[in-house]
Amino acid sequence: MGAKTTFVGQTFIIERKRLVPGDREVAPTENGAVKKAEAMSGIAALKIVADDEAGKLESATILGQFGEVPDDFAESSQGS
């Protein structure tokens, strides 16, 4: 089947005085993910390319960050 692209908004919540990942909001398009993220707070819009059959993440690109997002989120998402 090959690589599949998914657009999501990764929310963040405060738990024990730290920002941690919350729910993910799936969007049908890149523009939809960014627009949804702009309307919310504490969310990062992402483009994820993965091969589900092989279980391999090919890339994760941050399309935008809005509101409170962990300072090290960009580095941690690239390390996946």
Image: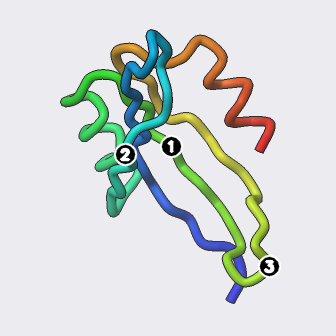
| Nearest to viewer (mark 1 / mark 3) | 3
Query: Residue at position x 45%, y 28% from top?
Result: 64
Residue wearing tag 1:
46
Q: Is residue 31 placed above or below 52 in the rendered structure?
A: above
Q: Say what amino acid the circle numbered 2 marks.
A: Asp
Q: Which mark is residue 23?
A: 2
Query: Label 1 vs label 3: CA separation?
Result: 21 Å
| Nearest to viewer (mark 1 / mark 2) | 2
Q: Which mark is residue 54?
A: 3
Q: Say what amino acid the circle numbered 3 marks.
A: Ala
Q: Say what amino acid the circle numbered 1 marks.
A: Leu
Query: Label 1 vs label 2: CA separation?
Result: 13 Å
Residue 16 pos. (x, y %): 45, 16
Residue 78 pos. (x, y %): 75, 36
* Residue 44 found in image quarter: top left
Quadrant for the C terminus, please: top right
Is label 1 in contact with label 2 (beta carbons under 8 Å)? Answer: no
Q: Is residue 45 left or right of residue 25?
A: right
Q: Earlier in the sequence, mark 3 or mark 2?
A: 2
Quadrant for the N terminus, please: bottom right
Q: Is residue 50 placed above or below 23 in the rendered structure?
A: below
Q: Secondary structure at mark 2?
A: strand
| Nearest to viewer (mark 3 / mark 2) | 2
Query: Label 3 vs label 2: CA separation?
Result: 25 Å
Residue 5 pos. (x, y %): 56, 65
Query: Residue at position x 39%, y 49% from top?
Result: 24
Q: Earlier in the sequence, mark 1 or mark 2?
A: 2
Q: Secondary structure at mark 3?
A: loop
Q: Is residue 58 placed above or below 16 in the rendered structure?
A: below
* Residue 54 found in image quarter: bottom right
Query: Residue at position x 74%, y 60% from top?
Result: 57
Is label 1 in contact with label 3 (beta carbons under 8 Å)? Answer: no
